[in-house]
Image (cartoon, rainbow, N blue to C red):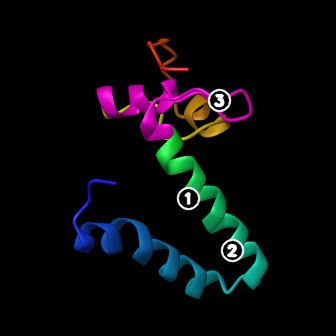
Amino acid sequence: MYMHPFDFFLESVFPFLVGFSIWNGHMLSNLLFACVAAINSPQSHGGYTFPFLPRPDNHYNHHKYFNKNYALGIMDSLHETVLSQPIQTRK
């Protein structure tokens, strides 16, 4: 990752700590959530397509247009922020 340690703490570690302390979830569910996020973030930014993970196209369009594809699923459809333009990804 190309991040300054302060950015890493502010964007990656701090939100988890705040979320875990507010909702006071079970330790195993917190660990599972952290593992899924740790796998999803590099995969969605890396541009590689894997058969068992979501394609990074939606995330690329989110960075390209800034007001589209905030999340996967029904919320983008509900708020009409879906943009589904296929882009070239590496396999």
* Spatial CA span between label 2 and label 1: 10 Å
Give left or right: position of 61 versus 32.
left
* First in residue order: circle 3 vs circle 2: 2
Circle 2 residue: 31
Tell me which residue sits at (59%, 52%) in the image. 39
Tell me which residue sits at (26%, 72%) in the image. 5
Q: The N terminus lies in which quarter of the figure?
A: bottom left
Q: Measuring from the top left, give residue 58's x and y in whole percent.
A: 50, 28
Residue density around tag 3, few if under 14, some if 14–19, many if 20 or more, within 10 Å: few
Q: Measuring from the top left, give residue 13's x and y in whole percent.
A: 43, 74
Q: Are marks 3 and 1 in contact (CB under 8 Å)?
A: no
Residue 80 shows in the view: no
Residue 80 falls within the magenta-colored stretch: no
Q: Amino acid at mark 1?
A: Ala
Residue in front for this viewpoint, 68 or 54: 54
For residue 46, which numbered disc appears in the image? Answer: none
Residue 63 falls within the magenta-colored stretch: yes
For the residues carrying marks 3 and 2, which lies nearer the camera in this image?
Answer: 3
Circle 3 residue: 50
SS of the residue under disc 1: helix
* First in residue order: circle 3 vs circle 1: 1
Circle 1 residue: 38
Q: Amino acid at mark 3?
A: Phe
Question: Which stretch is magenta?
Answer: 44-65
Residue in front for this viewpoint, 25 or 35: 35
